[in-house]
Amino acid sequence: MTQKIHQHTFENGLTLLAEPMGGVESAAFTILLPAGAIYDPENRAGLAGFTCEMALRGCGSRNARQFVDDLENLGVEHGEGVSDSHTSFGGATVAENLPAALEIFADLVRRPHLPEDKLEQGRQVMFQELRGIQDDPPQMAMQELKRRHLPAPFGKPPSGNVEDVTAIGISDIREFFEQSYRPNGCMIGFAGRIDWDETRNLVEKLFGDWEPGPDRVVATSPRLGGYANLPYDSNQTQVSLAYPSVPYSHADYYRASASVGVLSSGMSARLFTEVREKRGLCYSVYATYHSLKDCGSVICYAGTSADRAQETLDVTLSELDRLKEGIEEDELDRLKARVRSALVMQQESTSARTAAIVRDWYFLHRIRTLEEIESRLEALTRDDINDYVANNPARDFTVVTLGPNPLEVKLGVSAGDA
Amino acid sequence: MEFRQATLDNGLEIVAECNPDARVAALGFFVKTGSRDETPELAGVSHFLEHMAFKGTSKRSAEAVNREFDAMGAENNAFTSKETTAYWAAVLPDYLEPTLDILSDIMRPALRVEDFDTEKQVIIEEIKMYEDQPPFGADEKCEEWHFGKHPLGHNVLGSVESIERLRVEQMRDYFERRYSPGNISLVAAGNVDFDHLVEMTSQRCGAWQRFETSRQVVTPPRFPGFHQLKKETSAQQYTVNLSDAPGAESDDRFAADLISTILGDSSGSRLYWKLIDSGEAEHAGLYYVEYQGGGIFWTMLSCEPEKAEANLRILRETYQEALADGLTEIELAQAKSKTKARLVLAGERSRRRLFAVGSHWIARGDYLSVRQELDLVDAVTLEDVNRVLNKYPLTESTTVTIGPVENMSVDS
């Protein structure tokens, strides 16, 4: 079946994206609002997260209980999340229930009650989350890594901190809502058993008269970079590091992303082979590509016993360093096979497709078909990638470890941007 | 969608849910062996053996196994539970034969001592990783205390000590006792040509020698009680609660699953409204797990230490109230909608169907289509759920709490 992807931007700035899929009974949607943690004001870290939490406590004609009950009676698997740039609400259900589900979500993003008498309950939920993170060493390390590696306010944890969350009042939440839950900069994506005209009419009806919000500018600070060990009493030391790459929209994206694949895509990839298979240093080790609109990164992680952490860091860094010497033909062949296969498998999941089309639109302002991605990938040669890795060696590392003892970083630590 | 089934002369069963329209083929060997089949000195061997399968065979090195899977773009892995060890891959349909070739090969692993020694370190790292994660081993302790010496009390990973002590000869011997073709099923889902699959499997696995295997399936005794473990460095207090539930053989398992959804689903359940929505707890959930001879209801609760005692009381009151007054039609209808939507969504992915068909087959030697499963969920009545709730009272439980709190008092 040829893939058909539809797109429409309404006058108020809301962008609708939709991919009808064959062979499925379900439909999934994602609403991405320009309401991420980067818009948290000074001394109000966690405000985007707190607002999202409060938005779930009743909207339109429903109180919190009716909101949840109605969604569940419709069989909607739903979830929400706050990242650097966005607050997202998503759901999936059998296709015939989609319109009813979307009506509820239209109330959620446009007419939440944000009830003052539930503020303390919402705050307690935020506190529970903050405490939960303290018992999750990999997440703690990763949060600190992002905080140091990305230009603030990017990389700030959406969960905020105890002091700021304590200070947040209902007026902060209502103000944040007014500014950030808005059609301009908002994307709604659909995938699954849907009809384009019906979907477009439905979205028009539910969101067409939504008033745009004000323009906002986010000023960024220099990156911190460097190395930090967070002392922590645990069996394992968490080793995390990041280095710069190109953003998703960059002409070199495919080459950059292929180089990360050689490191970490599949069990024959370099990090898994060298760190785990040959040396038995850890159970979990990986590298992953990460992008903001204009700043790409490669993020690596390994968790290992404290007494083997230095060796794990050394081996990981030497593999990252070795990348500049180039890759083998068979590594590229395997990588192409893996991506080809992943693209097909993605078509078995309506949720995965909505996430993909919304991501493409956000970063590229267009949606790549699977065919385009595949042909771009097929065209990649070993020389292309070798040329890229030779000119863009892994350097300027931001390193964060979490464990009893600091480690020695033996290769190119970033001095930050300051 | 068609279900097909065949058995080779050596007892290896082949089952498949064939869907010629699927884009993906998923395939896996499901071995009826896990931690409940281990003696205490072998604790963790099933899971360790699962890792060793990827370390190569007489024909393939460890690197070759990983490279060949990756070269096909396979999404592949393995898992071990108390009852099952499964090795699986999802691939584009054209790769079915080479995928079967590797999977069947690693089912006869070389178990080389050098690989064994290296992989031992990985297993120990895996154990240490979990020890650093909530609930810091309280779940395993809870099972040990609940089941006493019954094999269902064995944990899957074993301990650092049991793994350190384990010798490769013991693993080889365990393999010789458990990996009989009669104790293994090859399961497939998605775009699979069944006749061709049987032929290919016969060529590769037909010569595997059959021998007798058995599993001790006695209904476990239980030892309810309350246990406190101290962990000063923990930020939250974690409480786990375990009680009996219908076993894998029981028709009551659908009712049990709906009970867990009504009382303890992550959204919209009684525990959700009492503990999560109010911000009293970070997490409070009830889960149903089926085992042969007896299932369990798991409750997991995490919250700030100061609230732990009060929350545990709320938890127990919630269960007592459910037992005393029963659940309601409205709750049941809501839980059914949710369960059915999840089944439909999961049913669209070949890999998910592989796990569903495979676990159902090895637990019960039977097949259920998504449609049949939806009908069985629909057929559960309020009377059923309330009867099952009374038959397996959530209040008769083993509870373990871990964290900074000392001397928590609980009324029983």
Image (cartoon, coloured by chain):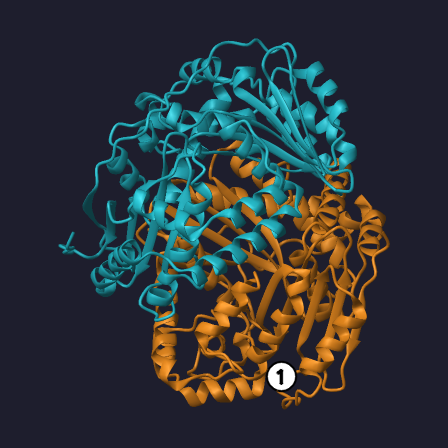
Relative to B185, is A272 above or below?
Answer: below
Q: Can you give x and y, in whole percent of width and height, for residue B158 in the image? A: 36, 31
Q: Nearer the viewer, residue A324 or B113?
A: B113
Q: Which residue is rendered at x = 73% and y = 24% of the image?
A: B197
Above-or-below relation of A408 to B167: below
What color is chain A drawn in?
A: orange
Secondary element at image label 1: loop
- Residue A25, how many percent across, how many down? 70, 54
Amino acid type, mark 1:
Arg
Q: Is residue B151 above or below residue A77?
A: above
Q: Which residue is mark 1?
A: A182
Left or right: residue B104 versus residue B297 is right
Q: Which residue lies at the image location 66% right of the left edge and 90% below the top edge?
A: A211
Which chain's residue wears label 1? A
Residue A135 is left or right of residue A182, and the answer is left
Q: Position of residue B223 (x, y in %)?
A: 21, 37
In this rendered view, identify the residue nearer to me: A336 or A332.
A336
Residue B277: x percent and y percent?
A: 38, 69
The reply, left or right, for residue A38 in relation to residue B262 is right
Q: Is residue B382 left or right of residue B76?
A: left
Whether residue A347 appears in this view of the structure is yes
- Shown colour of chain B: cyan
Q: Nearer the viewer, residue A416 or A354?
A: A354
Residue A156 in view, yes or no: no
